[in-house]
């Protein structure tokens, strides 16, 4: 059975307050007045303001309170080069230090001089000439230093120097080789290919060298040098068989053997070849019936014996 109670109506609140009928009617009338003509009274219009949505705010970049630096690792190649350069520099510094210590160290000071190869000069003469080098570190002594101090010894042609730590200097002397005797009064002087006088002797047979007739003073410097150059090309065993040497001109050098045989040499050209040909001729068998009196090697490729 239906209920006898009437429903109650509570006017809606407007903006948080109870609705006022008078106000509502006034608003309704105003809306009716503003409605378009011809429209039915039953058309209800309503509007609502839609709030504009503001654009999204971009977050502001916050500045860091403290500066932060990112350290990127150094390339491996650069690190490797730095290590190599550092190691090379260290090694060079060590080597330089060792060299400086060796050059100036008194531990390597010269105390003993060993001499070999002397014949016309004595080891004592060489040691006396090199005495100013004593006490000097071995690395500071050069061949020129030794050669300069031995310049007064004309018999010394060249030298070889070897430092033997801690305090010994070995000097090998290469003397000039005498090739002839030059008679000066009652004495004979031994001379080399340059005419340098190396020694003096009273007995020419003790030297086993040919005698240059008249010497440089009698035959002239050009003839003397030509004759000495020829003698310098001969081996020692042939020099020992010669009695004397002479020259009418630079192109006519002659040698005499102790057996009385003559060697026609000619000029000083091709002296090495001439020396070999002469050695071969002297070793050839001798025919007693036809003894050789002359060996002509002036044209070494066509030697003649007669």
Image (cartoon, rainbow, N blue to C red):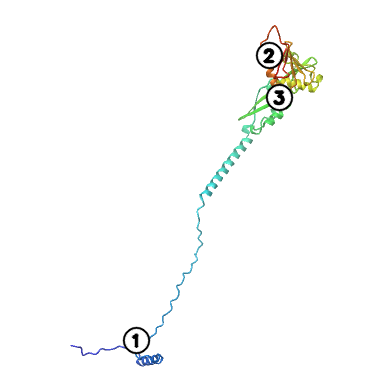
Task: Indicate which disc, 3 or 1, sits on the residue closer to the N terminus.
Answer: 1
Picture mark count: 3
Q: 187 and 288: which one is in front?
A: 288
- On residue 300, the disc is none
Q: Mark 1 = which residue?
A: 13
**Gap in angstroms between the C-alphas marked 3 and 2:** 33 Å
Q: Mark 3 = which residue?
A: 156
Q: Name the front one of labels 2 and 1.
A: 2
- Mark 3: which secondary structure? strand
Task: Indicate which disc, 2 or 1, sits on the residue closer to the N terminus.
Answer: 1
Q: List the single residue furthest toward the front.
A: 302
Q: List the single residue furthest toward the right.
A: 218
Residue 35 locus on image (x, y percent)? 40, 90
Within 10 Å of disc 2 (Cα), the crowding (few <14, some 14-19, many 20+) is few
Q: Mark 2 = which residue?
A: 282
Residue 196 locus on image (x, y percent)? 75, 23
Q: Is residue 84 above or below residue 150?
A: below
């Amino acid at each position: 059975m239906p209920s006898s109670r009437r429903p109650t109506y509570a006017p809606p609140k407007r903006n948080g307050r109870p609705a006022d009928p008078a106000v509502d009617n006034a608003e309704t009338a105003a809306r009716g007045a503003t409605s378009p003509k011809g429209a039915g009274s039953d058309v209800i219009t309503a509007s609502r303001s839609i709030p504009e949505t503001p654009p999204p705010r971009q977050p502001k970049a916050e500045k860091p309170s403290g500066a932060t630096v990112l350290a990127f690792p150094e390339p491996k190649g650069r690190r490797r080069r730095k290590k190599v350069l550092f190691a090379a520099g260290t090694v060079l510094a060590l080597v330089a230090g060792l060299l400086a210590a060796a050059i100036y160290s008194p531990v390597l000071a010269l105390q003993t001089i060993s001499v070999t190869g002397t014949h016309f000069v004595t080891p004592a003469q060489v040691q006396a000439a090199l005495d100013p080098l004593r006490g000097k570190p071995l690395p500071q002594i050069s061949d020129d230093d030794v050669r300069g101090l031995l310049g007064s010894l004309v018999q010394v042609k060249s030298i070889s120097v070897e430092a033997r730590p801690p305090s010994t200097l070995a000097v090998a002397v290469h003397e000039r080789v005498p090739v002839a005797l030059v008679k000066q009064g009652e004495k004979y002087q031994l001379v080399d290919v340059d005419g340098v006088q190396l020694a003096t002797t009273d007995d020419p047979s003790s030297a086993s060298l040919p005698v240059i007739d008249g010497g440089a003073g009698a035959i002239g410097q050009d003839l003397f040098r030509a004759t000495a150059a020829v003698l310098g090309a001969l081996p020692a065993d042939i020099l020992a068989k010669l009695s004397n040497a002479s020259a009418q001109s630079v192109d006519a050098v002659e040698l005499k053997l102790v057996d009385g045989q003559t060697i026609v040499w000619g000029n000083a050209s091709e002296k090495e070849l001439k020396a070999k040909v002469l050695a071969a001729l002297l070793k050839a068998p001798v025919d007693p019936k036809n003894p050789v009196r002359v060996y002509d090697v002036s044209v070494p490729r066509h030697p003649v014996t007669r």
